[in-house]
Image (cartoon, rainbow, N blue to C red):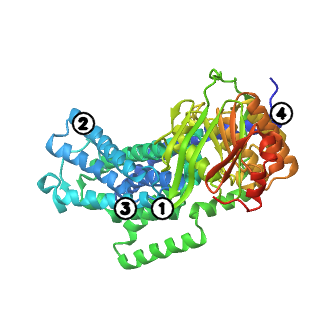
Amino acid sequence: MPDDAPALGLAARPARSRARLSRSAPFVVAGLAAVALWVAPAVLDTFAVNVLTRSMIYAVLAVTVDLLWGFAGVLTFGQAAFFGVGAYATAMALTYLGATPEWMAVALALSVAAPMALGLAVGWLSFYHRSTALYASVISLVTPIVVTQLIYSGGEWTGSSSGLVGFDVLPLELEGFFRLAALVLVAVTLAAWVFVRSDAERALVAVRDNDARCAYLGLSPKRLQIALTTVLAGVAGLAGFVFANASSVVAPENAGFLFGTELVIWVALGGRGTLLGPVLGTIAIDYLAANLSGDLPFLWQLLLGTAFVAVIILLPGGLAELVRRVWARLPFGRRQAVAPRLVASSPRPNAAVSGAPLLKIENLAKSYGSLTVLENIDIEIRAGELVSLVGPNGAGKTTLMRCLSDGTEPFSGAVSIGGASTAGLTPNRIVALGVGRKFQVASVFESLTVADCLLLARAPHDRLSPIGRAETLSLPQAALDVLRMTGLDRLLAEPTRLLSHGQKQALELAMVVALEPRLILLDEPTAGLTKAERTTIGAVLRTLTGDGVAAVLVEHDLDFVRQISSRIVVLHQGRLALDGTVDEVVNSELVRTIYSGGAHG
């Protein structure tokens, strides 16, 4: 079928060619960097080789901090703990088991597995349902303190405050450890670079921007954050393995809170969210510290602290932001965003429509302390129905929508969708039952493009690649219609933050429709829209219900409600006042009394 996005013509081909070229550039740069670092020991003195080996190991840690803080939005002090656990696992294995090839392999496995196990536990504690970013940061702050205390308490097994020293290591010279650290740094940085330019990385940015919307798109922010924490803990442990072998000594401060704080400072100075900024910043700062802190210990700390404060105030994006600004001014520095090609997805087979209601609400009640917000609500909605919830402000309409879409919301009574109870289900699990929700205030991802938002809406159906960007975006026909009727099909590469209010409303509706739900919940979708935009949304809703989708609409525009509703439910003071056809409700004396303020519970 013909493509739906105008950006798919001949004009887009040069941009796509440049995009393919830019995807290969990091591998070329990584190869050149690996070669340069491989020969570097031949021109560096022993002191520089020794210090830079450590600096490159620390830079690997900086990459993990940047992925968590710069891309996922989780300020973490805990990477030092994972690094220390990996280093100690290596040192203890080599001290007590030996350094034969077999035991070295065991040490390597332990250096990755032990931090990952700790990372899994820390991630679970940090990102349980309804936890906040502040809580996660506090957990990451406590983790290195706890690990350090365990090391102190380990007695001769961990060396206590003296650490472990003198164990056998890999049979490499100083130059060999330099090259090993360099190869690990290049490999980790390249892998991170590929990942942050993939579709899967967009999910992390989305969680950082708006984790609630992620959940209502069927994604699990908790699982994403736990998985990232666990994997990056393993990478930090790998860095600990290299460090233990290169230095032949591990100490409690390698897992300490102070080291974790230094990593955050280095990433901030280099430029979080850039990868290369933290890598270069960490290497430069650690190398300068080795050269200056011995002669000027107090002055060096003062200079570093002053630089940190100045960068945070003047350049929140770090020194990399300054480089990026200069680069963007150059003719070859401007990068044109390339939107994916829109295609229509194959229609999903609908479940057989029976006489049973798709949505069933039984005796639902909701209270906040002594204040009763909803009481004895009983509603049944079948496939193809569009039921509007109306009533004065404070009637409980939005609260009811929240109870329908979040089974962890405390309320009494029962809600079932397609015969399945929603009790205790998180929003992403309710989405899996076939529910899509549009919020009263447009809920999109401000840091992403229009195409990215739609891509995430398709994540429950189309797997997000961790190694690349899809060149096509498959959407159901109804979502394509929303984009076409609102002009968003010509703005796929546009950052969402630049859209108008009406365009954001339309984008969120397209995202919900892209889920291909059986039941769609809409909270004032026409608020603040023009007449033409309201007409467009009405047409889309009629098409959806005609295809068997059920819809629950909260709306104050009664003219709009009359035009598209199958039934109207009137709520008043948290109770169901009337449930009837459009004519019955419009001509009801009770409804007139409610809206005139004359009806009381």
Q: Position of residue 327 (x, y in %)?
A: 68, 57
Taking the image as shown, residue 139 lies to the left or right of residue 89, namely right
Cα separation, mark 1 vs mark 3, equals: 35 Å
Secondary-structure class at tag 1: loop
Give the label, 2 or 4, closer to the camera: 4
Q: Which mark is residue 106?
A: 2
Q: Position of residue 128 (x, y in %)?
A: 42, 50
Secondary-structure class at tag 2: helix
Give the label, 1 or 3, closer to the camera: 1
Whether residue 438 is situated above or below residue 518 in the rendered picture? below
Residue assigned mark 1: 369
Give the label, 1 or 2, closer to the camera: 1
Cα separation, mark 1 vs mark 4, equals: 59 Å
Looking at the image, can residue 150 be seen? yes
Tell how many labels: 4
Residue assigned mark 3: 141
Q: Amino acid at mark 4?
A: Gly
Q: Amino acid at mark 3?
A: Leu
Task: Give the camera-side residue of 382 and 290.
Answer: 382
* Mark earlier in primary sequence (3, 2): 2
* Mark earlier in primary sequence (1, 4): 4
